[in-house]
């Protein structure tokens, strides 16, 4: 495949993302449809909620990169875009697996069968796209170009952004990539939780604060992991201690999400307060961060001997 050729598998993955998002929004936002949805409750809904926002974000950046497809760095662009499409498809597949698991826990009603039919169509399409992406795997090696470079190419075409889209600005972002991830995660969390608080008419500030932390940890883990997979920002070499610290934080963010999804099974007795929710979810995150950090530090010391 030539570097200037846009892989058909990438276009197919974008079609899958559109189909999945349409079905997911219908099943989560329409009250009548949600009432008969087998995956309306956790732990299944936790995965659906994550994918509902993560999949369109990945699809958007993949679609935008197609605008700079003929810019320098073609081999890296093909490999990175295929990897991003693969990550998006894997996220869709994992969500569909959760939804199939949820189907086995309920007695389907008439409306539920419609959702199951859509789930089946989504599943078949996902398998087809995954097979197409598997055949697009390229050579391995360190990337010399990243998505941020393509952002400069596209931004240079827009007069308002041209003065800000400079190589110096891109290098600044690369040097402070973790700060960028934290800010992006915080802004997204504020928007999502703000809309949820207004829609649900929350009045407890502690509930809002806890929800912000939960959403922030989800977004931060998504940013760091997806960047490691697809190379959105080519980060400079970091010290072993820095890499261990970041890995520990991501592990803690993941533990928060797992505890949130399986909170009813993990907590002894009913969860009746924000304090209980915070103790379970944030406690799990803190423990996972500490354990992961200790293990990585111990392994690092053993390698240095």
Image (cartoon, helix red, strand yellow):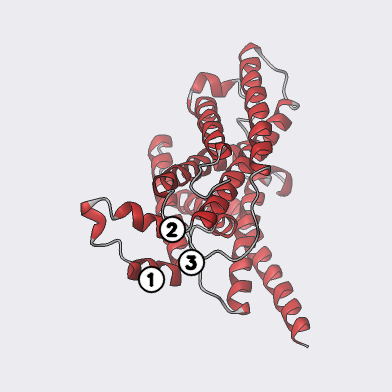
Closer to the chain start, of discs 3 and 2, is: 2
Closer to the chain start, of discs 2 and 1, is: 2
Viewer-side label of 2, 1:
2
Question: What residue occupies the far top of the structure in this picture?
Answer: 110
Closer to the chain start, of discs 3 and 1, is: 1
Residue 146 tag number: none
| Vertical relation: 220 (above or below) 115 | below
Q: Which residue is mark 2?
A: 72
- Give the spatial CA distance, label 3 vs label 1: 11 Å
Residue 270, horizontal then vertical, whole percent: 67, 43
Q: Which residue is mark 1?
A: 172
| Vertical relation: 113 (above or below) 96 | above
Q: Which residue is mark 3?
A: 178
Viewer-side label of 3, 1:
1
Identify the residue at horizontal 40%, vertical 51% (top origin). 190
Identify the residue at horizontal 55%, vertical 53% (top origin). 80
Residue 115, horizontal then vertical, whole percent: 61, 20
Count neighbours of disc 1 (C-alpha within 10 A) and say few if under 14, some if 14 to 19, many if 20 or more.
few
Residue 65, horizontal then vertical, whole percent: 44, 48
The quarter holding residue 125 reads top right
- Give the spatial CA distance, label 2 vs label 1: 21 Å
Count neighbours of disc 3 (C-alpha within 10 A) and say few if under 14, some if 14 to 19, many if 20 or more.
some
Identify the residue at horizontal 60%, vertical 47% (top origin). 87
Q: Quadrant of the N terminus?
A: top right
The quarter holding residue 203 reads top left
- Give the spatial CA distance, label 3 vs label 2: 26 Å
Count neighbours of disc 2 (C-alpha within 10 A) and say few if under 14, some if 14 to 19, many if 20 or more.
some
Instruction: For residue 170, say whether it is visible.
Output: yes
Which structural element holds mark 3? Answer: helix
Camera-side residue: 7 or 62?
Answer: 7
């Amino acid at each position: 495949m030539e570097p200037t050729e846009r892989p058909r598998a990438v276009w197919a993955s974008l079609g899958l993302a559109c189909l999945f998002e349409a079905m997911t929004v219908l099943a989560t936002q329409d009250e009548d449809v949600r009432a008969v949805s087998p995956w309306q409750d956790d732990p299944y809904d936790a995965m659906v909620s994550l994918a509902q926002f993560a999949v369109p974000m990945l699809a958007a950046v993949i679609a935008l990169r197609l605008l700079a497809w003929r810019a320098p760095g073609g081999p890296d662009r093909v490999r990175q875009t295929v990897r991003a499409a693969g990550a998006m498809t894997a996220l869709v597949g994992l969500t569909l697996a959760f939804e199939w698991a949820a189907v086995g826990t309920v007695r389907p009603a008439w409306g539920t069968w419609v959702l199951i039919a859509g789930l089946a169509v989504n599943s078949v399409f996902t398998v087809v796209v995954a097979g197409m992406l598997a055949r697009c795997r390229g050579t391995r090696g360190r990337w010399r170009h990243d998505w941020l470079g393509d952002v400069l190419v596209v931004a240079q075409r827009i007069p308002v952004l041209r003065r800000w889209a400079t190589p110096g600005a891109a290098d600044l972002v690369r040097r402070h990539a973790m700060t960028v991830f934290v800010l992006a995660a915080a802004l997204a969390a504020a928007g999502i939780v703000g809309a949820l608080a207004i829609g649900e008419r929350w009045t407890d500030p502690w509930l809002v604060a806890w929800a912000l932390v939960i959403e922030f940890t989800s977004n931060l883990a998504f940013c760091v992991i997806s960047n490691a997979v697809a190379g959105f920002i080519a980060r400079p070499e970091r010290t072993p201690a820095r890499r261990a610290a970041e890995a520990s934080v991501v592990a803690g963010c993941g533990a928060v999400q797992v505890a949130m999804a399986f909170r009813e099974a993990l907590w002894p007795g009913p969860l009746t307060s924000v304090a209980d929710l915070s103790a379970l979810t944030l406690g799990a995150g803190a423990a996972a961060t500490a354990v992961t950090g200790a293990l990585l530090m111990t392994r690092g010391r053993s390698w240095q001997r």
